Image (cartoon, grey):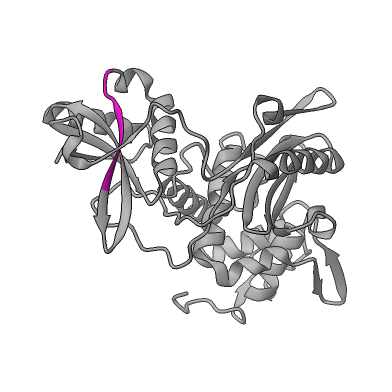
């Protein structure tokens, strides 16, 4: 968007990038590849040599790129994700969850609509060879508009899918399939069971913020419904392995978490862990933080406090009932756990 790299920009291939394990385009050291072709190969083929080429051209080294990706992931609320490389090839320190992959897909769809259509690409041609997208749902599951497969021997067969039918939009993730066919079967079953429960409509979604900076307005209003049909749909067995089926952006929340007006919020100080344009997102974040810091936050009620900005209603995700010193020390501990937060007065 800044114009530093355009679809026609030539990305230089280093020996390190060229040496990556398959799947790859077999790029040679010193060669170049257009940005548009790089995107096409990543979306359809998951080309590892191209992933590293992109990383090195953007960040200088693959290691720097992985650190940038991890920092951005945490800023988006993907707190269980750490990247160690650009391609997703095995690394013991590289971890993620189905929920985090769903959060990533949500942000791609919402914040980069002009590029998201790339994930609908069924075929990609490069130097006389035609590659078919590994996402089979694009070819036979009604309403699929993306997004991405992934595979390593250690992680199994994985898929994040975006499906739209009428005024309903589901994002779902399946991780850990023993085969691609079993993964796809699990995904179809999850979506089939979830669509009747999805609610049509429009609601604005906004990225997590854990700072004093006001959230950026979202140009396009969309609804991302929960693709989960209860405990039986959460885990699908694949020949002795479990494929975790999870979904996404507006998860069902405990009834005990209520939205409150600022004037009624407990105090005198709060620890704020995000601000969102929907109560469901705020409550989801509160649940995630509480799960990771249960002892630290015991006795501090979760609140989704309402505030208005530029004719838009937002929900601050907060834990209440702190003294000023207590709030500061708690926030410091949360940050040491890679959980972003700020200290705020109750009013």
In this picture, residue 135 sits left or right of residue 5: right
Q: Does the magenta stretch include residue 300?
A: yes
Locate residue 142, reporting x and y percent: 79, 56
**From which residue to which does the magenta span run?**
299-306
Q: Nearer the viewer, residue 118 or 18?
A: 118
- Residue 60 at least partly seen: no
Locate residue 281, reporting x and y percent: 43, 43
At horizontal 23% and vertical 29% (from top left) the residue drawn is 320
- Residue 320 at least partly seen: yes
At horizontal 65% and vertical 44% (from top left) the residue drawn is 172
Image quadrant assignment for residue 334: top left
At horizontal 37% and vertical 30% (from top left) the residue drawn is 257
Location of the C terminus (image quadrant)? top left
Q: Nearer the viewer, residue 290 or 43?
A: 290
Q: Is residue 92 magenta?
A: no
Q: Is 283 placed above or below 87 here?
A: above
In this picture, residue 48 sits left or right of residue 273: right
Locate residue 162, reporting x and y percent: 67, 54
At horizontal 34% and vertical 50% (from top left) the residue drawn is 209
Image quadrant assignment for residue 324: top left
In this picture, residue 252 sits left or right of residue 287: right
Locate residue 53, reporting x and y percent: 62, 64
Q: Nearer the viewer, residue 25 or 122?
A: 122
């Amino acid at each position: 968007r800044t114009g530093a790299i355009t679809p026609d920009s030539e990305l230089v291939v280093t020996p390190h990038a060229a040496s990556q394990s398959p799947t790859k385009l077999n790029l040679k050291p010193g060669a170049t590849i257009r940005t548009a072709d790089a995107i096409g190969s990543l979306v359809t083929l998951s080309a590892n040599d191209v992933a590293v080429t992109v990383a090195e051209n953007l960040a200088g080294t693959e290691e720097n790129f992985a650190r940038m990706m991890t920092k951005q992931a945490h800023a988006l609320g993907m707190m269980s994700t750490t990247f160690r490389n650009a391609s997703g090839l095995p690394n013991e320190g590289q971890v993620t969850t189905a929920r985090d992959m769903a959060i990533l897909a949500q942000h791609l769809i919402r914040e980069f609509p002009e590029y998201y259509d790339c994930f609908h690409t069924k075929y990609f041609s490069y130097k006389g060879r035609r590659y078919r997208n590994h996402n089979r749902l694009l070819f036979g599951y009604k309403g699929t508009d993306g997004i991405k497969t992934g595979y390593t021997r250690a992680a199994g067969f994985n898929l994040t899918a975006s499906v739209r039918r009428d005024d309903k939009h589901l994002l779902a993730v399946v991780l850990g399939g023993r085969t691609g066919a079993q993964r796809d079967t699990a995904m179809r079953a999850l979506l089939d069971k979830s669509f009747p429960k999805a609610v049509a409509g429009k609601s604005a979604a906004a990225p997590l913020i854990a700072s004093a900076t006001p959230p950026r307005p979202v140009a396009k209003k969309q609804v991302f419904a929960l693709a989960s049909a209860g405990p039986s749909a959460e885990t699908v067995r694949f020949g002795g392995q479990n494929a975790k089926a999870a979904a996404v952006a507006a998860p069902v929340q405990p009834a005990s978490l209520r939205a409150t007006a600022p004037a009624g919020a407990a105090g005198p100080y709060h620890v704020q862990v995000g601000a969102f344009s929907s109560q469901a997102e705020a409550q989801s974040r509160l649940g995630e933080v509480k799960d990771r810091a249960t002892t630290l936050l015991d006795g501090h009620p979760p609140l989704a406090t309402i505030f208005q900005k530029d004719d838009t209603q937002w929900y601050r995700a907060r834990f209440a009932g702190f003294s000023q010193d207590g709030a500061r020390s708690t926030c410091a501990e949360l940050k040491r756990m890679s959980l972003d937060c700020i200290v705020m007065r109750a009013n």
